[in-house]
Image: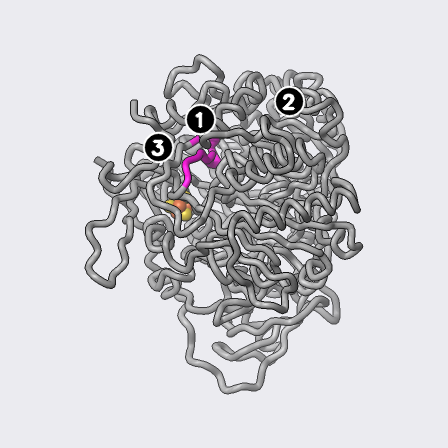
């Protein structure tokens, strides 16, 4: 077996890794560049890895072009300025660490550990996550480590924990091939998880009647175009719809009484709640026809295997966790879980959001699906990390929005952002900018130059990214893939985990951060997962490198390929009683409903070709072609009411600010709702900061902001209209590599 921690070179041939974009986690085969002609770029080319079990050779246009993004617009040296109105200037790493160490010590002396906060990313590899958590929660005694997964899937985490007793998506991608009915709720899978959607479509083409696709989404999307049934509900009414479905299942005898009795608790209260949500009431509340709800119930009741997929349309809501419980309730009551083709299955956005959960990458978590509020869990980690008892604080750390509020109170002395661009992705961006401006030192680990967050940073540290550092990532189906280093980092860029470890050593934790490689970090991490739901103790870089991706649980002694495709197959759950909890919560609706002044609901989403805040994908011309600029989708009735014309410009105004965009009048958005993509930040030529308009109310349980809905109004802009921009869906789309 070759040494997995040694960087590959182009002479080693293609490198195999997990795609660094979305949570589908497709396998990529990266082919080294041939000798580049003078003046041209040496580009690694990507194609689908036929050996990767999660994607079987499939890849979408983002994955296929990732090689074009790796070397352009990179940061190569640390940069610093004392004040953010000064230009950033290059400094040495030594000076950068001196500044960082001094600010940590100053903050600890003046404000204590709670004055330090980090905001990390699902772009981290698991080793980055683990060392960052050890540094913050262990060495520094601050649980203020949160990640952009807070914006993406923290409601799914809270939902699984409340219902099942532990986090952990119970399903796998093979379930797409075995389900009779697939319910896609709050997910535009065709654009956000394209390879999974293509897998579903391929089966639908072959087995038209055997597979029924149901989509719940206020918009007509590329996903709903493929649906047998599309329920275009009002934004914020998903939970009511789910309760209405439960109501009908009760009436139809669609309850698996034996399963409910043996494996759940709380059925009586749930049945009482469901009884209130009659089809007539659901029809009024959700803005759909009663017959559509009956169609959904008939389909669910008749299906041997129902699979529910969701992502941010469910999670980014003030009732995100309650809605996740609403989905899980239906699966538990009808016995649609723990068997092939059935179950509630959250799709993660980031490529390693799952690994972040495993490594404790949210403000309340510790590695191995543990909690900072559990004294036993803290003691286990303190021993594992060689720290004194009591080193880990007993209270939850600050979530990202709480970190913003802490900066408003001057309670933070250091805000450290890594591998993410919150000055585009957080809600209420004007408030964020004002809060961050009060923080004495903002540090940013970043691979790319010129991001919106770099504009507010004092110290910018050049980060080695995917392809330049070895580490693992876990995708939505709990499959762990080893990603080797096959390119040399540009200039002085360093891996995030190595930056965190260096600071740890400088702060006096020599032993705790004496790592020679990321393989050593991973070995230390997996030991502490033994016996937990997310048991990775049988994995190592070496095993993953030699035998390919593996699904967890994968306890010590598991043979390669012997991981676990589905959780909860026994009907026993990791709760005190061993039963899953049925949770009864009445729908609340939107955090900021429309009113006379702001009569429309703005919802935001993604285009297939763009990734989040465009730091990578904006540099690939082919990816910009289908959507050169953001388009505001408006229903014809709303366009008339607000005096808008197709291809004209409009101002979108909320209580927090205004942005301008080109109007696309379309029946594909329901009346009363408008849509903007979230990708274009202030640094883009076609800037349209959609999240500037969003409010910061979030789910009270998961603390996930309701980024999917805010009340807005529209005003036409009396300027000469620009030529019509393409939004035809005529994009390069998906590329499939033929199977061998
Ligand atoms: S679907 Fe596309 S972006 Fe997502 S992991 Fe696969 S190739 Fe990457």
Mark 3 or 2, nearer chain start:
3
Task: Select label 3 or label 1 by which is in front.
Answer: 3
Q: Where is residue 451 in the image (x, y as percent from the top left)?
A: 52, 60
Q: In this view, does 519 lie above or below 572?
A: below
The N terminus - image quarter: top left
Q: How is the image coloured?
A: one colour
Mark 2 nearby-residue class (10 Å; few <14, some 14–19, many ≥20): some
The kind of secondary structure element at disc 2 is loop
Q: Where is residue 739 in the image (x, y as percent from the top left)?
A: 24, 37
Nearest the viewer among 291 and 540 is 540
Separation of disc 1 and disc 2 at Cα?
Answer: 30 Å
Quadrant position of ligand 1? top left
Q: Give the range drawn in magenta.
A: 469-480
Viewed as shown, does residue 309 lie left or right of 373?
left
| Residue located beneath label 2 in the image | 386
The kind of secondary structure element at disc 1 is strand
Q: Is residue 113 above or below residue 634?
A: above
Mark 3 nearby-residue class (10 Å; few <14, some 14–19, many ≥20): few
The C terminus - image quarter: top left
Mark 1 or 2, nearer chain start:
2
- Residue 6: mark in rendering: 3
The part of the image, by quadrant, that contains residue 479 is top left
Q: Is residue 610 above or below residue 718?
A: above
Q: In this view, does 36 lie above or below 470?
A: below
The kind of secondary structure element at disc 3 is loop
Residue in the image at 73% along x and 47% along y: 106
Q: Where is residue 157 in the image (x, y as percent from the top left)?
A: 62, 35
| Residue located beneath label 1 in the image | 551
Q: Does the magenta stretch include residue 477?
A: yes
Residue in the image at 74% along x and 66% along y: 595
């Amino acid at each position: 077996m070759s040494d997995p921690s040694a960087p590959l070179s182009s002479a080693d041939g293609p490198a195999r890794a997990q795609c660094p974009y979305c949570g589908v986690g497709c396998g990529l085969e990266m082919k080294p560049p041939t000798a580049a002609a003078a003046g041209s770029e040496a580009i690694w080319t990507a194609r689908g890895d036929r050996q990767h079990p999660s994607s079987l050779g499939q890849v979408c246009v983002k994955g296929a072009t990732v090689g074009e993004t790796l070397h352009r617009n990179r940061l190569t040296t640390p940069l610093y300025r004392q004040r953010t109105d000064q230009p950033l200037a290059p400094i040495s790493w030594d000076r950068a660490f001196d500044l960082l160490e001094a600010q940590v010590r100053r903050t600890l002396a003046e404000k204590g550990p709670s004055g330090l906060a980090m905001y990390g990313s699902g772009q981290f590899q698991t080793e980055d996550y683990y060392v960052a958590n050890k540094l913050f929660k262990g060495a520094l005694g601050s649980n203020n480590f949160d990640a952009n997964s807070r914006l993406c899937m923290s409601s799914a985490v809270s939902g699984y924990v409340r219902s099942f007793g532990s986090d952990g998506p119970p399903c796998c991608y093979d379930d797409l091939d075995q389900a009779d009915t697939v319910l896609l709720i709050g997910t535009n899978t065709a654009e956000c998880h394209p390879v999974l959607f293509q897998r579903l479509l391929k089966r639908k083409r072959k087995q038209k009647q055997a597979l029924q696709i149901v989509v719940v989404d206020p918009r007509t999307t590329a996903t709903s175009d493929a649906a047998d049934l599309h329920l275009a509900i009002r934004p914020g009414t998903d939970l009511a719809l789910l309760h209405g479905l439960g109501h009908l299942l009760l009436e139809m005898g669609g309850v698996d009484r034996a399963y409910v009795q043996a494996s759940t608790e709380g059925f009586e209260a749930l049945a009482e709640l469901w009884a209130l949500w009659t089809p007539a009431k659901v029809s009024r509340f959700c803005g759909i026809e009663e017959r559509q709800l009956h169609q959904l119930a008939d389909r669910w009741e008749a299906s041997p295997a129902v699979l529910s997929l969701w992502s941010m349309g469910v999670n980014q809501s003030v009732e995100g966790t309650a809605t996740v419980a609403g989905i899980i309730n239906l699966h538990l009551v009808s016995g649609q879980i723990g068997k092939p083709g059935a179950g509630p299955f959250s799709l993660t956005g980031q490529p390693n959001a799952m690994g972040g959960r495993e490594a404790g990458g949210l403000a309340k978590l510790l590695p191995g699906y543990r909690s900072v509020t559990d004294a036993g869990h803290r003691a286990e980690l303190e021993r594992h990390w060689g720290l004194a008892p009591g080193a880990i604080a007993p209270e939850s750390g600050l979530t990202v929005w709480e970190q913003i509020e802490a900066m408003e109170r001057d309670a933070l002395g250091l805000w450290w952002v890594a591998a993410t661009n919150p000055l585009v992705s957080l809600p209420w961006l004007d408030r964020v900018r004002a809060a961050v401006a009060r923080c004495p030192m903002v540090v940013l680990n970043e691979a790319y130059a010129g991001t919106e967050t770099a504009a507010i940073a004092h110290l910018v540290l050049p980060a080695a990214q995917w392809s330049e550092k070895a580490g693992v990532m876990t995708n939505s189906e709990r499959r762990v893939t080893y990603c080797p280093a096959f390119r040399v980092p540009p200039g002085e860029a360093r891996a995030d985990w190595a930056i965190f470890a260096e600071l740890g050593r400088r702060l006096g934790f020599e032993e705790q951060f004496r790592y020679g490689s990321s393989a050593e970090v991973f070995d230390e991490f997996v030991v502490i997962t033994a016996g937990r739901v997310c048991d990775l103790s049988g994995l190592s870089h070496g095993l993953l490198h030699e035998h390919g991706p593996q699904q967890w649980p994968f306890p010590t002694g598991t043979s390669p390929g012997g991981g676990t495709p589905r959780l909860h197959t026994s009907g026993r759950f990791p709760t005190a009683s061993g039963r899953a909890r049925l949770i009864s919560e009445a729908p609340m609706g939107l955090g900021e409903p429309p009113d006379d002044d702001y009569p429309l609901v703005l919802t935001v989403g993604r285009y297939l070709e763009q990734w989040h805040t465009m730091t990578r994908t904006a540099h690939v011309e082919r990816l910009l072609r289908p959507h050169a600029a953001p388009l505001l989708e408006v229903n014809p009735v709303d366009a008339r009411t607000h005096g808008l014309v197709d291809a004209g410009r409009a101002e979108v105004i909320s209580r927090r600010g205004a942005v301008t965009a080109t109007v696309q009048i379309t029946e594909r958005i329901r009346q009363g709702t408008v849509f903007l993509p979230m990708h274009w930040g202030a640094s883009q030529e076609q800037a349209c900061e959609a999240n500037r308009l969003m409010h910061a109310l979030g789910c009270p349980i998961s603390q996930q902001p309701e980024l999917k809905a805010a009340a807005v109004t529209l005003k036409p802009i009396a300027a000469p209209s620009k030529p019509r921009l393409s939004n035809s869906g005529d994009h390069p789309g998906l590329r499939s590599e033929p199977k061998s």
